[in-house]
Structures are given as C-alpha cells and as structure tokens.
Amino acid sequence: MGSDKRRVLERVTLQGSHVRLEPLTLQHVPGLVAAATMSRGSYGFTEVPSTQAAMRRYVETALARQEAGTALPFVTINCATGRIVGSTRFGSIEFWDWPPGSAHQRGEDLPDVVEIGWTWLSPEAQRTGINTEAKLLMLTHAFEVWRVHRVWVRTDSRNQRSRTAIERLGARLDGIIRAERMAYDGEIRDTATYSITDAEWPAVKARIAGLLRPS
C-alpha cells in the first residue's frame, strides 16, 4: 500500500571509474540527441528520441515524474571522453505505509521499492563496462543508501539482448506478464520482469564487481 504524500528524492550524482550518472536536465538535450543519432540499429525495443523536439519532450516527461516523486532520471556520461552516451533512471518509486513501530521501516522518506530502467546507450558505450558499472552504482545507492527491499527491472520479452544483460547481473526472472502494454514498435508487448531483493544484494554486488575486474 502506498501513501498519498508526495516525496521527492534528493538528486544525486553517482560517480564510477568508467561512468558518471548526473541528474538529468533540459541542458542535456543536445548531447542526448548527438548520442541517440550516432547509430540507431540497437533501439528496436527501446524509446530513444532522435530529434531535438522529441528529446526535449522525453526529458520534460522524465522531469515531471521526478517532480511527482515517482522517478529519478540521469544522463550517462563516459568518464574517458566526457561525452554523453545515454540515459537511465530510477522509476516506479514506491513508499509503503508501514504500521507504527514496524521493524521493516527505515524512515518515511526512504523508498521501499524502485525500478531501474528507461536505459539506452549510444554505440560507443555498448559492450563496455559503462552499463555494468552504471547498474552497480544505481543498485548500491538503492540498497545501501535508501535500503530498499527490492529493485526490479523490466524489458520486452523479445529483447534477448536486454534480458541477457539483466540476467548477467544476477537478477532473477519473476515471470512474463503477457500482453502487458503496447510495445515501442507498435506490437502488444509481453514483459519479462526481473528483481533483486535486499537479501540477495551482497551476492549480486560481488558478482557485478567481479564482472568489472580485468580478466
């Protein structure tokens, strides 16, 4: 059960060795368009605007959800080049109404569940450590700063590339929700839903850290 009280999470920058996640703003629109138009062959299942006007609407929608307390969007920056290479966000942020004295409540302004998604990367950042480290930064913030109970990730069930990347992190498949929404390509989408719980986080963190270590 969620509360009607609007809670807006603090905007943060998440810094790693390969990637920096900065709070998304309208000033990032030109850089996002440049990243989105390098090559669009990998965006078949993902909304990635390709024009200034469309990208501005995309960012404005993300910022409106941030103001409503249901999202925290980032721009993804390649530390090696300083260039914008994509975007990602926390979304579907839930605050549960715990009874007074509950051992499970960590503070009324801390979320209980978040989703990581709305992620896309330009070709230069794909198949690099950028996405893996970005997920590690976001998961660490969710589980160790907010101390959430669960992080979930969703993708079009047809998007095997995305599903493989999610499973590589150690997230568990909860199931396939059939006919869950209209897909980006206009088809009816079955959604593959994955999650990581707070009890699973230490093992998942070690797994992701291992993926980032040089072989």
Image: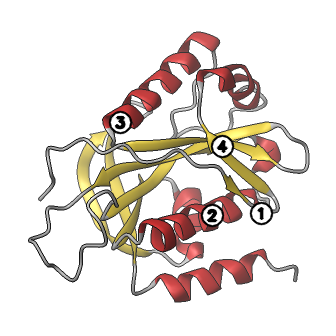
Residue at mark 4: 22
Determine whether label 3 and label 4 are within 8 Å by CB: no
Determine whether label 3 and label 1 are within 8 Å by CB: no
Q: Residues within 10 Å of mark 4 (few under 14, many from 20)?
A: some
- The mark closer to the camera, 3 or 1, is 1
The front one of 77 and 50 is 77
Looking at the rendered structure, the secondary structure element under dot 2 is helix
Residue at mark 3: 187
Q: Which mark is residue 208?
A: none
Q: Which mark is residue 137?
A: 2
Residue shown at 15%/54% (left/top)? 2
Looking at the rendered structure, the secondary structure element under dot 4 is strand
Q: Earlier in the sequence, mark 1 or mark 4?
A: 4
Kind of residue at disc 1: Gly
* Left or right position of 109 against 31: left
Q: Earlier in the sequence, mark 3 or mark 4?
A: 4
Q: Earlier in the sequence, mark 3 or mark 1?
A: 1
